[in-house]
Structures are given as C-alpha cells and as structure tokens.
Image (spheres, rainbow, N blue to C red):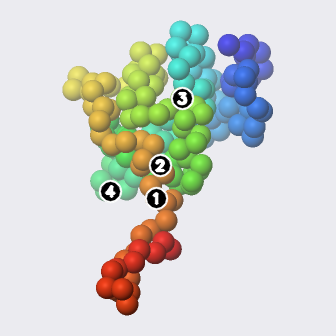
Amino acid sequence: MAKYDEPGLQPPTSGRKKDRFDKPLRLLHLAPMQAMQYEQSVFSILKRDKRFDPHAYFFLKDALDFTLKRIAEGNGGQARHVSGPELLDGFRDFALEQFGPMASTLMIEWGVRKCQDVGDMVFLLIEEQVFGKQDTDRREDFSGIFDLEEALVTPFLPKRKTVAAAPTGRAQRVFS
C-alpha cells in the first residue's frame, strides 16, 4: 500500500492509470478536526483491510449525509437513525446523482460491487467508532437488498417501447 505522507489520504495507484481521483481526499464539509479524525480512521482501516479504495469510504460518508438530510426533510426536519436498507437507497441515489452513468464503473474501481460491501464498510467504520450503531443493526441488514451494479446501470439503459403492430401483424420494439 502507498505511504500517506501528505495531509489527506492518497489513494493507492500501483497497477492502474492515474485519474482525476488521484488527489488528496478531503472532507471539506466537516470541521477540520472531524475531517482529520475521519481520515485517520480510514487510514487505520486500510492498514488491516484493503478491500475498498479510500474514495469508497469518503463517498460513503457523503452518502450517509445525503441520506440523513433526505430523511430529515421527510420527517419534519428531525434527524433519526438510518437503517441499512435506507442507507443503501441513499448510497445508490447519491451515486447516481453524483456520477451518473459512471457510478457503476467507479464503484467497481473502488471495490464496492454489492450491497454487502457497503455494509462491510459501515461496520468497519463502526469498529473505529466513527459511525454509530443501534443494538438491532446487523451486517445482514445490507445483504440481498438489491443488485447494486444493476441499480447503478439500469437507469441509463435505453427504454424499450412497443409500437403498434406492423403490416406483418407482429409488434416491433424500438429503443429511444
């Protein structure tokens, strides 16, 4: 794993081309001390578990903030605990909003291929005492909710329309 000498985590670059995500990761929406603690927690996780790119953890934090805001808006402005399935919905929706058709590609690049991967990251952050948990929260809450890759690709596939029967008597499908 690459050394993290400069402030802000540096994503590992061995074996892949440099891209626009190969710059220090920062949580600008957090107070400087909180952002530094989060970065240190992610670095600590990466020392023992290298399955996920550092960007995935920072994106997860942003997706949690997105989900909390959405829940508060629908709950009279009151924040509350987010369940695993709710976080997964927010994670998917935020990825689609932020990255559009590239969401699936980025998640695969970052090592996040299924909903369970999101749950694994959540519980690694819980172990670091960065995220909180209720007694009823379990890793299994993130299993089999939906197919993450399909959920990130399907919105961008062409829509099928069936048109009136052609002179041959068979309906034709067209893509729009």
Say the numbered circle drawn on residue 74.
Answer: 4
Q: Residues within 10 Å of mark 1 (few under 14, many from 20)?
A: few
Disc 3 versus disc 2: distance between alpha carbons?
14 Å
Q: Which residue is mark 3?
A: 111
Q: Which residue is mark 1?
A: 155
Q: Position of residue 162 (x, y in %)?
A: 37, 77
> Could one spot residue 67 in this view of the protein?
no
Most distant residue in the bottom direction: 167
Q: Looking at the image, is mark 4 or mark 2 nearer the viewer?
A: 2
Ranked by sequence position, the earlier of labels 4 and 3 is: 4
Kind of residue sitting beneath label 2: Leu
> Could one spot residue 73 in this view of the protein?
yes
| Residue occupying the point 43% across, 28% down | 117
Q: Which residue is mark 2?
A: 152
Ranked by sequence position, the earlier of labels 4 and 2 is: 4
Disc 1 versus disc 2: distance between alpha carbons?
7 Å
* Image position of 115 (left or right of 38): left
Disc 3 versus disc 1: distance between alpha carbons?
21 Å
* Location of the N terminus (image quadrant): top right
Ranked by sequence position, the earlier of labels 3 and 1 is: 3
Q: Looking at the image, is mark 4 or mark 3 nearer the viewer?
A: 3
Q: Circle 3 — which element? A: loop
Disc 4 versus disc 2: distance between alpha carbons?
24 Å
* Image position of 11 (left or right of 150): right
Q: Position of residue 174 (x, y in %)?
A: 46, 75
Picture quadrant where residue 143 is located: top left
Q: Looking at the image, is mark 4 or mark 1 nearer the viewer?
A: 1
Q: Circle 1 — which element? A: helix
Kind of residue sitting beneath label 4: Gly
